Image (spheres, helix red, strand yellow):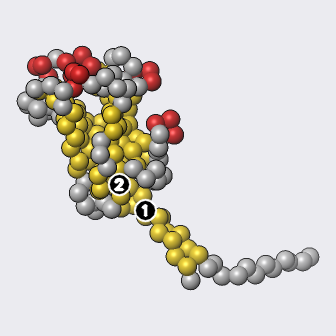
Amino acid sequence: FGVDVFVTPPFKNWEVFSNEENIRDPIFDWNLTQFSTLDRDSYTSGSFSSGGRDWVLKVYPNGAGRATGNHLSLYLLSASNETHYVHAKLRVLDQIRFTHLEKQVEGWPDSTTENGWGYDKFIPLADIKNATKGFLVNDTLKVEVDILSFSKTDFFSV
């Protein structure tokens, strides 16, 4: 009967994974003006900072993937292509009654959406074009993201 004992050297590098929930500037709004004339496949917002990270919103006015031609597609992306866990709310704003269409995203980025979080079928184009729904006012569509939390990894050396 024998015992093998292994002694490993102490760790010199540490990695601490945490979830950041107290986000500074969690909400970003983006107005897509002259919506009816948008003719490119996709549009990307300017970069914005939330919680010390840089982000962009990406909209496909005529849909992406299986939603092409009948839905608007909406995504949140990391501007620096960082990979982290995110919990956020994406919205298309009702500019009349304020009954916004909201969908949550939570998880690691979907590699099929260029390191982003979102939906191919966010809202039917018929709902956007229906004036009584209030999503398109004066040919302007307003989208918004509310970042609730994201993962953070800190590295330490001893």
Q: x%, y% of residue 119?
A: 38, 32
- Please give left or right for residue 21 compared with residue 158 in the image: left
Residue with the mark numbered 1: 152
SS for callout 2: strand
Amino acid tagged 2: Asp
- Please give left or right for residue 90 compared with residue 138 in the image: right
Say which residue appears at 22% left-offset and 40% top-offset: 30
Vertical comparison of 45 with 26: above or below: above
Image quarter for residue 129? top left
Mark closer to the chain start, 1 or 2: 2
Most foreground residue, 45 or 152? 45
Q: x%, y% of residue 125?
A: 27, 19
Q: x%, y% of residue 135?
A: 16, 27
Q: Is residue 121 visible?
A: no
SS for callout 1: strand
Which residue extends farthest right?
Answer: 1
Most foreground residue, 13 or 138? 138
Q: How many angstroms separate mark 1 from mark 2 (CA)?
A: 13 Å
Say which residue appears at 27% left-offset and 44% top-offset: 145
The disc at residue 81 is none
Residue with the mark numbered 2: 54
Quadrant of the drawing holding the N terminus: bottom right
Say which residue appears at 37% left-offset and 26% top-offset: 41
Vertical comparison of 116 with 20: above or below: above
Quadrant of the drawing holding the C terminus: bottom right
Q: Are marks 1 and 2 in contact (CB under 8 Å)?
A: no
